[in-house]
Image (tube, helix red, strand yellow):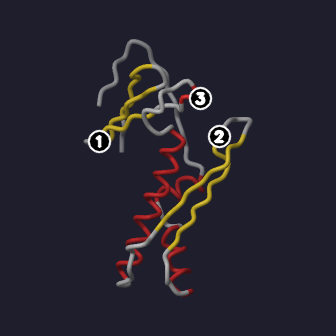
Amino acid sequence: MTSYTRYLNGKKFETIVGAHRIVTDQPVAGGGMDAGPTPPELLLASLGACAGHYAVEYLHARSLDATDLEIRVSAAKGTNPARLASFRVDVNVPGIDERHQQGLLRAVKACLIHNTLITGPGLDVEVTAGHTLSV
């Protein structure tokens, strides 16, 4: 998997992922124009969408209704270094019984983004000059 991000202006960036374009920005209070979500908000959205995907797969495999499925993801900031220090994923499926609540919990915890965050992935950063990156 690869993404390509380029600076637009102000606090705004454009990221290309496959055939999709995502604009991120900072809120007005942070010097941006609020033209898109912040990068941390995208991380929360990614975790929520991943959890939702795994939840729907679980529900559909058991012929259970996913119509009213809701996922809320929240995070608390940490310092030294600045980061998102903890996440909470709340999954709501009205009318699901206890047995399926436990199965759904196991399914959501199998989410790729969840597992990436809990295992502390490796991360390499390289800075180059005079080298053009491309999509």
Task: Check the image and report above or below for 100 versus 117.
Answer: below
Task: Check the image and report above or below for 78 versus 30.
Answer: below
Using the image as rendered, state which of residue 59 and residue 125 is in the foreground: 59
Which residue is most to the top?
130
Q: The N terminus is located in which quarter?
A: top left
Q: Position of residue 90 (x, y in %)?
A: 57, 65
Answer yes or no: do the residues labelled 1 and 3 have beta carbons within 8 Å? no
At label 3, which amino acid type do we have? Answer: Ala
Using the image as rendered, state which of residue 97 and residue 127 is in the foreground: 97
At label 1, which amino acid type do we have? Answer: His
Q: Residue at x 39, y 83 (%)?
A: 64
Question: For residue 65, which quarter of the picture?
Answer: bottom left
Answer yes or no: do the residues labelled 1 and 2 have beta carbons within 8 Å? no
- How far apart, in angstroms, are the residues tagged by discs 1 and 3? 28 Å
- Label 1 sits on residue: 20
Q: The C terminus is located in which quarter?
A: top left
Using the image as rendered, state which of residue 64 and residue 85 is in the foreground: 64
Q: Residue at x 50, y 37 (%)?
A: 38
- Label 3 sits on residue: 29
Tell me the crowding category of disc 1: few under 14, some 14 to 19, or many 20 or more residues within 10 angstroms, Cα based.
few
Tell me the crowding category of disc 3: few under 14, some 14 to 19, or many 20 or more residues within 10 angstroms, Cα based.
few
- How far apart, in angstroms, are the residues tagged by discs 3 and 2? 19 Å
Which residue is most to the right?
80
At label 2, which amino acid type do we have? Answer: Arg
Q: Secondary structure at mark 3?
A: helix
Q: Residue at x 38, y 73 (%)?
A: 67
Q: Position of residue 75 (x, y in %)?
A: 62, 51
Task: Check the image and report above or below for 42 versus 116.
Answer: above
Q: Position of residue 20 (x, y in %)?
A: 29, 42
Tell me the crowding category of disc 2: few under 14, some 14 to 19, or many 20 or more residues within 10 angstroms, Cα based.
few
- Label 2 sits on residue: 83
- How far apart, in angstroms, are the residues tagged by discs 1 and 2? 26 Å
